[in-house]
Amino acid sequence: MDLSYGVEYERYRERVREFLAANWPPQKEDGASRSEQVVRFRERATAEGYLNRHIPKRYGGSEQPPDVIEAQILREEFGRAHAPMEARGIGTMMLVPTLLERGEEWQKEKFVPGTIGGEITWCQGYSEPGSGSDLASLKTKGELVDGEWVISGQKIWTSGAQHADYMFCLCRTEPDAPKHAGISYLLIDMKQPGIDVRPLRQMTGTADFNEVFLNEVRTPEDWIVGKRGEGWLVSRTTLKHERNSIGAAAQSETLLHGLVSLAKKVERNGRPAIQDPSVRQRLAQVEGLVRAHQYSGYYQLTKSAKDESPGRLGLMNKLVSTNIGHEVAKLAVDLLEDDALVAPGARDIGDAIQNAPGWITQYMWSLGIAVAGGTANIQRNIIAERGLGLPRDAAADRSAGK
Ligand SMILES: Cc1cc2nc3c(=O)[nH]c(=O)nc-3n(C[C@H](O)[C@H](O)[C@H](O)COP(=O)(O)OP(=O)(O)OC[C@H]3O[C@@H](n4cnc5c(N)ncnc54)[C@H](O)[C@@H]3O)c2cc1C
């Protein structure tokens, strides 16, 4: 097995390293804040063809020919230099790819540049009380009245809605059609009367998601992606991107590094925990999972480079990475022992034990992220049915819900 990328690609890697050495971390620029420096860096990196590669230049991207190996090298090198890649909001990760694939020309021109530049923020209005895994049962109503959509209903678990400028929203616009054919994908301005956003506080102590009540909210007739009744199809594009982004193997690797350094720092029976045989065994098990994920990533990369489908492995990324995230965080919390019982926001243990508050938050998040974007059980159903060809789940009416 040859895991190197070849001479041409190693030259490309050298060029990327030179660019990063010259541009990141940034020189102290007169009075520029950290976020301004990040914006400037991203502009330079896009101009060089290193960021926003799949986005045409007319929408603010760098329009590079698709090359999965170059993309992988960029992830590796930017990661090594701790340099920012594309802004990781819901808008860039989910809406932009969806608009590029299915949007009207004017929609791409209006929304893509500001979204990738970080000036426009989005939230995803899919889930409703009672419609999560069985998403197609959603009830929020959209009616066309005098050239405008009038939308009423309730969304829930809407991440970032309290800060978002716009929502991409699934609404029932064809009440008489079968449930999957009755949904449309509408874009909604969040800054208007009739929208009531109520943050939900989580066990991490923060309020990252919200209930959103929509009471006769209005949006222009052409702020629809795809045709009337095609929203289910369009939402599948968005979900594919959500799952891919949740499934990146590099995150598992980063978590493992953090875990090993924690195990060196905390003590068990008067010596560093990493010397304790039971801890070593658990670390080795977790590393086994991370390596398997990493090599599966290489395999999928090779397939993509040859323009071939990754097959059922591609369906497993989200489940595998969220499982690993949970296993790593669980071991970290066990290593922290009683200190893991303090609230995630408590800073006083942070000095004594490396990044303890971060690990506690990570542990709590590892439970939520296994639910977001399609629960672990739903992922298992998808792998079983689409990957292994097993018979459909008895509750098949959920129709491949979120
Ligand atoms: C951190 C986080 C962020 C989120 N952000 C957003 C967002 O921005 N926008 C948005 O629209 N939504 C968001 N969600 C909601 C998320 O998509 C839903 O929580 C998810 O789809 C599950 O739906 P539910 O919560 O209604 O659970 P349910 O669908 O009620 O599921 C409850 C349990 O039953 C199981 N189950 C359900 N159906 C089946 C089946 N057929 N077979 C086997 N088991 C099944 C599930 O696996 C789960 O364990 C977010 C969720 C989280 C946790």
Image: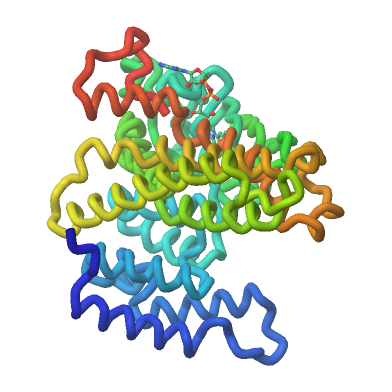
* Residue 177 placement, left or right of 206: left
Which residue reaches farthest top? 394
Residue 384 visible in image: yes
Q: Which of 185 and 317 is in front in this view?
A: 317
Q: Position of residue 330 (x, y in %)?
A: 61, 37
- Whether 248 is drawn above or below 132: the answer is below
Q: Where is residue 374 in the image (x, y as percent from the top left)?
A: 44, 31
Q: Which of 121 and 81 is in front in this view?
A: 81
Query: Which residue is depicted at the point 36% across and 25% down?
Result: 380
Q: Which of 62 and 326 is in front in this view?
A: 326
* Residue 170 placement, left or right of 101: right
Query: Which residue is depicted at the point 66% across and 51% down?
Result: 163
Instruction: Name the quadrant containing residue 77.
Output: bottom left
Query: Which residue is depicted at the point 17% across and 45% down?
Result: 309
Q: Where is residue 301 in the image (x, y as percent from the top left)?
A: 24, 56
Considering the image in quadrants, where does the N terminus appear? bottom left
Query: Which residue is depicted at the point 25% across and 62% down?
Result: 68
Considering the image in quadrants, where does the C terminus appear? top left
Number of labels in the image equals 0
- Whether 76 is drawn above or below 95: the answer is below
* Residue 332 placement, left or right of 109: right
Color theme of the render: rainbow
Instruction: Name the quadrant containing residue 6.
Output: bottom left
Q: Where is residue 61 in the image (x, y as percent from the top left)?
A: 36, 70
Residue 219 visible in image: no
